[in-house]
């Protein structure tokens, strides 16, 4: 299929297209049941393939969706046995998937369980790319986009066939992006080795913020002491260090998003996390880590709680006449 990947040549990148089938939706609780990978060089030619069923050692979940019964998976290898093969096809390449954060998070979790680091420095999501392209399709599912780009899907929820289809969708998407002059939504992937269950160290006891919340971040800033800040997703700066800097600057670091949140910090707004969805719904400003660190260099003074005007003293009740 060398012609299928012609558009990939224009970006001087090595790609690895990935699709996984899983036992559920939560990487920390569920497992990868099958994986298929297709490596494509900067010249657009296929340079490697890998696919395998996997024995998760647990209930495979919705068999009616993926068709992977316990009997089919019983003799398959465990993920740690095929991790070196997966790593070899990912090393030094852009990982591509449809809803890439899902596949990336599951692979990162499986590598962490094996005591290894997922060797991915950048990923590209064809779902996010097509949201930018806005093709005239009824939805952004892989099969729907495949039909739009002239790719035949033979077997949905089959990792190997989904990877073949993904190659065609990527090729068509790259061609459309080039015609429109759109940049690719490449997402940096900081090194991660620990499980998502303990990826973020336990937070230190929260110290009450001494400043009143001045409201939302407006325009390009500035940050003001007392602003309520939330962070979601992976950050280049360790999460504990980033929140410590914010707290030291007088900001009020929150663990969730509400209508009172001043700003949400995230490097990957798509696909949206729970915090991102809430921020969008509440109209909370969203900025990336680099912008936040820049604004942290000049945080404006806030108003302390003790500066609030005290309520006027209450008049003493009138004395009651003795009876």
Image (cartoon, rainbow, N blue to C red):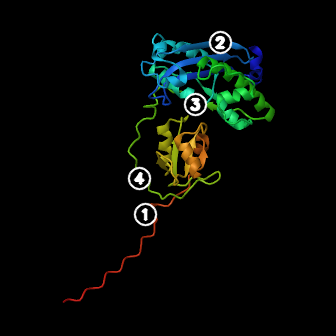
In terms of depth relative to the viewer, which is nearer, 17 or 156? Answer: 156
58 sits to left or right of 165:
left
Kindly identify which residue carries mark 1: 306
Q: Residue furthest top?
A: 75
Q: Secondary structure at mark 3?
A: helix
**Disc 4 or 2, which lies upstream in sequence?**
2
| Mark 4–mark 2 CB contact (< 8 Å) | no
Kindly identify which residue carries mark 2: 48
Q: Secondary structure at mark 1?
A: helix
Q: CA distance from mark 3 to mark 2?
A: 23 Å
Q: Secondary structure at mark 2?
A: strand
Q: Position of residue 73 (x, y in %)?
A: 48, 14
Q: Nearer the viewer, mark 3 or mark 4?
A: 3
Q: CA distance from mark 1 to mark 2?
A: 65 Å
Kindly identify which residue carries mark 3: 101
Give the answer, above or below, for where 86 lies relative to 176.
above
Q: Nearer the viewer, mark 4 or mark 1?
A: 4
Q: CA distance from mark 4 to mark 2?
A: 55 Å
Please state, as top left, top right, bottom left or bottom right, where the N terminus lies in the image. top right
Q: Secondary structure at mark 4?
A: loop
Kindly identify which residue carries mark 4: 208
Q: CA distance from mark 1 to mark 3?
A: 45 Å
């Amino acid at each position: 299929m060398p012609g299928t990947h012609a558009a990939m040549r224009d970006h001087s990148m090595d790609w690895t297209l990935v699709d996984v089938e899983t036992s559920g939706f939560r990487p920390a609780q569920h497992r990868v049941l099958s994986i298929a990978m297709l490596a494509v060089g900067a010249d657009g030619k296929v340079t490697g393939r890998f696919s395998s069923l996997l024995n998760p050692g647990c209930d495979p979940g919705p068999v009616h969706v993926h068709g992977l019964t316990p009997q089919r998976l019983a003799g398959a290898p465990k993920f740690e046995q095929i991790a070196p093969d997966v790593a070899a096809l990912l090393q030094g390449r852009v990982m591509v998937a449809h809803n890439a954060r899902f596949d990336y998070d599951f692979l990162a979790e499986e590598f962490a369980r094996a005591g290894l680091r997922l060797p991915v420095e950048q990923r590209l999501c064809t779902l996010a790319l097509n949201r930018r392209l806005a093709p005239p399709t009824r939805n952004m599912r892989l099969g729907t986009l495949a039909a739009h780009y002239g790719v035949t899907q033979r077997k949905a929820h089959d990792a190997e066939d989904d990877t073949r289809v993904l190659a065609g969708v990527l090729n068509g998407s790259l061609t459309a992006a080039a015609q429109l002059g759109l940049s690719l939504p490449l997402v940096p992937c900081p090194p991660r080795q620990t499980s998502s269950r303990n990826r973020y160290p336990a937070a230190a006891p929260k110290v009450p913020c001494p400043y009143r919340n001045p409201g939302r971040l407006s325009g390009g800033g500035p940050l003001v002491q007392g602003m309520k800040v939330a962070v979601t997703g992976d950050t280049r700066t360790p999460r504990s260090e980033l929140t410590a800097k914010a707290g030291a600057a007088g900001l009020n670091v929150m663990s969730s998003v509400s209508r009172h949140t001043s700003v949400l910090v995230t490097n990957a707004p798509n696909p949206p996390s729970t915090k991102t969805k809430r921020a969008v719904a509440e109209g909370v400003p969203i900025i990336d880590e680099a912008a936040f660190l820049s604004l942290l260099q000049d945080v404006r003074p806030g108003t302390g709680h003790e500066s609030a005007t005290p309520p006027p003293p209450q008049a003493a009740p009138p004395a009651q006449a003795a009876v």
